[in-house]
Image: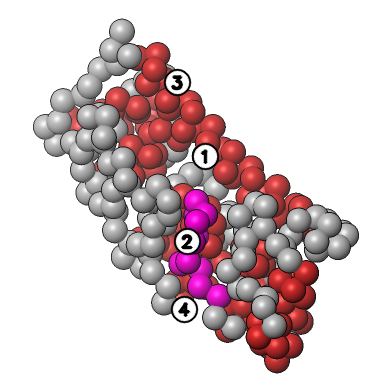
Amino acid sequence: MAFSLYFLRNMMRRRWMLLSTLAFMAASACGQQGSDMSNGKFATPKDAALYQAAAKGDLAQARQLLAEGASLNSRNAREMTPLDVAMVEGNRRAFDSLLELGADPAWLGDARDTSMHLAAKLADSRWLAALLERGFPTEVKNRLGETLLFPALGPSTQANVQLLLDAKADVHARTKDGRTLLHHAAMIGSFADIPRLLELGVDPRAVNAAGNTFQRYFFTGPRDPEVEKKVRAWLHDHGIAVEERRK
C-alpha cells in the first residue's frame, strides 16, 4: 500500500511538472518564427487571421473574420484557444482584443482545462489578475472538477494563489474524486502550500474517493523536513492524530 501511494504521489507530481513544462513549451512554440499554421498555433487559417487582427487591435477586421466563420473558441492540437495563445505569447493587445470580441476564458468545451486554468498555472500572474479584474469567476471547474486554486498551487505560482485568495476563492473546493487542496498539494509535492492551507481552514480530516486524508500522501515518500515539522505541530495543536507512514 505504501508503495502504491508513493507511486500515485509521484505520478501526480510528474503530471503537475508536465503541465508546467507544457505551458512553457507552448510559450516557446508560440514565440518561434514561421507561419501560424505550420507551427500548429491555430486550428484554421481564419482563426490565424483572427488572431493577427486581434494582435493589431483591428477589431473591425476581427469581427468580419468572425462573421466569415473564424472562431474565438477553436482549439489547436494542444487544446489551446486563441486567448490561450495570447497569454503564452505574452501578447497583451491580442489578449485584450479577444476578450473585447467576446472570448470566454471560462469556456471548457471538450477540453481538459479552461483558459482560466491556464492563466492560474502560468508563472506570469498578470493574465489571471486581468481576468479576475474583469469579473470572471474563481470557481470555474475543469474536466476533473478542479477550481482555479488547484492549478495555481506550486512554488512558481504563489502570486496566483494570492490573487485567488484575495478574490475570495473557495479554499474548501473539492474535485470530482473528492480531493481537497490539501490532497492536491501533497500529491504534487507542493509542500510549502500545506501549512498555509491548514491555516486557511482546509479540512485535514476530509477524505477523497479512495478514503484517504491528505496525510496518506504527505507522509509517503520524500518531503521537506521543515514543512513536516510545521504540519505535525499544527495537527498536534488541533488534536488530530498523525497518520504515520505504513510499512
Which residue has dot 1 on it?
Answer: 16
Which residue has dot 4 on it?
Answer: 134
Label 1 element class: helix
| Front position in the image: 11 or 196 | 11
Which numbered circle lies on residue 7? 3
Magenta: main secondary structure equals: loop
Q: What's the residue at 88%, 60% (across, down)?
A: 34
Magenta range is 103-114
Q: Is residue 30 left or right of residue 207?
A: right
N-terminal label among 2 and 4: 2
Which residue has dot 2 on it?
Answer: 108
- Separation (CA) of disc 2 from disc 3: 30 Å
Q: What's the residue at 46%, 49% (across, down)?
A: 151
Label 2 element class: loop
Dot 4 crowding, Cα within 10 Å, few <14, some 14–19, many 20+:
few
Name which residue type carries label 2.
Leu
N-terminal label among 4 and 1: 1
In reply to whether residue 217 is colored magenta, the answer given is no
Dot 1 crowding, Cα within 10 Å, few <14, some 14–19, many 20+:
many
Residue 65: image location, x then y, percent: 71, 82
